[in-house]
């Protein structure tokens, strides 16, 4: 069985810096802005922290029956039956496709960091790319169960 958790350090840093900027803004504008603006900023901070927690890591598991991946604590969990997987190959994504959940010319992309991914081709002809910092290990784990 293969299991790997990739941490998106840059995503986490961006969310933390954004939170610090908002907190600084609240501190310096508290006396000038109406109270509802302060509440909106606190709400924004809460959303940023939740997004950083949810999208701060991507976990992938491979076993003889299925491939699973999910963000953070289990958000947006996807499962592919091994019997429906035709192939798995390491690929490099375009930088402008970004991170998170994206529809690309090669199918859906789930990614938290970097450009490396494994492209899964399904029996239906659809393709899915799952970002990883271990593309060779991930694709070899899938291939070992396909053979």
Image (spheres, grey):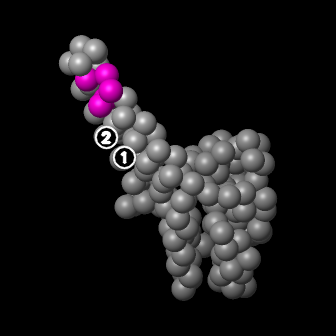
Q: Is residue 119 shown above or below 49?
A: below
109 sits left or right of 74 in the view: right
Residue 46 is labelled as 2
Quarter occupied by the C terminus: bottom right
**Tag 1 residue:** 49
Q: Badge 1 local density, few (<14 within 10 Å), some, or many (20+)?
A: some
Q: Is residue 121 shown above or below 64?
A: above
Residue shown at 52%/64% (left/top)? 7
Q: Nearer the viewer, residue 103 or 147?
A: 103
Horizontal and vertical percent position of residue 126:
70, 52
Residue 69 seen anywhere in this rendered image of the structure: no
74 sits left or right of 64 in the view: left
Horizontal and vertical percent position of residue 99:
61, 48
Q: Which secondary structure, mark 2? A: helix
146 sits left or right of 33 in the view: right
Outermost residue toward the left?
35
45 sits left or right of 16 in the view: left
Q: Which secondary structure, mark 1? A: helix
Q: Badge 2 local density, few (<14 within 10 Å), some, or many (20+)?
A: few
Instruction: Tally the marks.
Output: 2
Residue 108 is labelled as none
Question: What span is colored magenta in the figure?
Answer: 26-30
Q: CA distance from mark 2 to mark 1?
A: 5 Å
Tell me the chief SS of the magenta region: helix
User: Looking at the image, do the residues carrying marks 2 and 1 touch, with CB atoms under 8 Å apart?
Assistant: yes
Residue shown at 40%/42% (left/top)? 20
Q: Is residue 66 magenta?
A: no
């Amino acid at each position: 069985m293969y299991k790997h958790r990739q941490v998106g350090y840059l995503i986490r840093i961006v969310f933390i810096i954004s939170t610090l900027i908002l907190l600084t803004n609240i501190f310096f504008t508290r006396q000038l802005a109406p109270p509802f603006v302060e509440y909106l900023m606190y709400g924004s901070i809460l959303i940023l922290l939740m997004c950083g927690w949810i999208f701060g890591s991507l976990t992938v598991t491979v076993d003889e029956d299925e491939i699973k991946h999910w963000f953070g604590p289990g958000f947006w969990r996807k499962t592919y039956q091994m019997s429906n997987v035709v192939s798995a190959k390491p690929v490099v994504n375009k930088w402008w496709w970004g991170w998170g959940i994206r529809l690309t010319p090669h199918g859906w992309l789930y990614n938290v960091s970097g450009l490396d991914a494994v492209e899964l081709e399904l029996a239906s002809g659809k393709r899915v790319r799952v970002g990883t910092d271990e593309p060779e290990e991930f694709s070899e784990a899938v291939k070992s169960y396909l053979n």
